[in-house]
Image: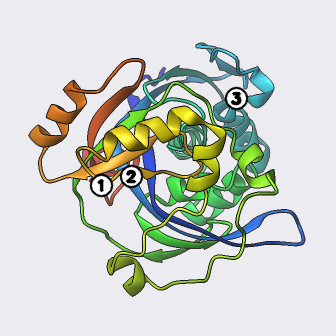
Amino acid sequence: MKREALPWPAPAKLNLMLRVLRRRSDGYHELQTVFQFLEQSDELRFRVRADGAVRCTTPLPGVADENNLALLAARALKAATGTSLGAEIEIRKSLPMGGGLGSGSSNAATTLVALNHLWGCGLDLERLAAIGRRLGADVPIFVHGRSAWAEGVGERFTPFEPARPWYLVVIPPCHVSTAEIFSDSRLTRNAEPITIRDFLAGRDENTCEPLVKSRHPAVREALEWLDGYSRGRLTGTGGCVFGEFDSREAAAEALRALPSPMRGFVSRGCNLSPLHRRLQELAERR
């Protein structure tokens, strides 16, 4: 059997706005957010196995196999389709975990999309997103592959293409647990709903930002530093923060001044996921 080892991107996302409207009876939260992708990505490679085994050949530090979302996604796709095929999964990380960039969810979505293609499962994006939703609330947007205005728990999408500036993403030296932020009694859960027009007029607050800054001084320090170059904003529940720039050069100049132990990268926003550009490339080769 042919052993497929092409690289598949698992891109980062930014939440350009995040509003927590209320807690639902099932424990989840009603949200409003704007998702946009970045060029910066993890890279996954898949080798199809005829024996049905699913393995990750690059264990993630601190992540047990039963919590590895790429492995869980592959096994969920096998269960949903009944395929006899398996896969070896290689994950090359460049995105931080616990940073609000969707790293694990993106790995899961890339696994679903790539193995659906490589195994010849033939599922459409809606079916793949439904499988992904059971793995995490952010998985469907990565499967969907286009920037969007999102509501519900982040799974109801309205097509939306925000501007595509250059971003400097700053990675503070801390890990922020989404579960801990959403379970904290101090989190404000009564933000008023807004419209896309409101967002375009400048309503881009993140409900979680005050709480994250109080729990994680490193995030507060990163935001304060970034404010010297561009208005700093928190993505998701953090801890990564980001600022917009008119050019790659301006963002790169700020990055060079980034103090230790903060890290960062420069990337342009994109409204079509690099993962879906890869799918288009494969379709054009046929």
Please report the residue visible at 42 percent of the width from the left and 37 percent of the height from the top.
222
Please report the residue visible at 51 percent of the width from the left and 38 percent of the height from the top.
219
Callout 2: helix, strand or loop? strand
What amino acid does circle 1 point to?
A: Cys
The answer to whether the residues at label 2 and label 3 have Cβ atoms under 8 Å apart is no
In the rendered image, residue 166, in percent from the top left (x then y), is placed at: 22, 49
Callout 1: helix, strand or loop? strand
- Binning the other alpha carbons within 10 Å of mark 1 as few (below 14), some (14 to 19) or many (20 upward) gives many
Pointer 3 residue: 68
The residue nearer to you, when weighing 137 against 181, is 181
Relative horizontal placement of residue 20, taking residue 242 as reference (left or right): right
Circle on res. 37:
2
Front tag of 2 and 3 = 2
The Cα atoms of the two marked residues, 2 and 3, are separated by 22 Å
Circle on res. 230:
none
In the rendered view, how is the structure colored?
rainbow
Please report the residue visible at 72 percent of the width from the left and 49 percent of the height from the top.
181
In the rendered image, residue 152, in percent from the top left (x then y), is placed at: 67, 73
Question: Would you identify the image quadrant in which residue 266 lies?
Answer: top left
Pointer 1 residue: 270
Of mark 1 and mark 3, the one earlier in the sequence is: 3
- Binning the other alpha carbons within 10 Å of mark 2 as few (below 14), some (14 to 19) or many (20 upward) gives many
Relative to 257, say whether 237 is above or below. below
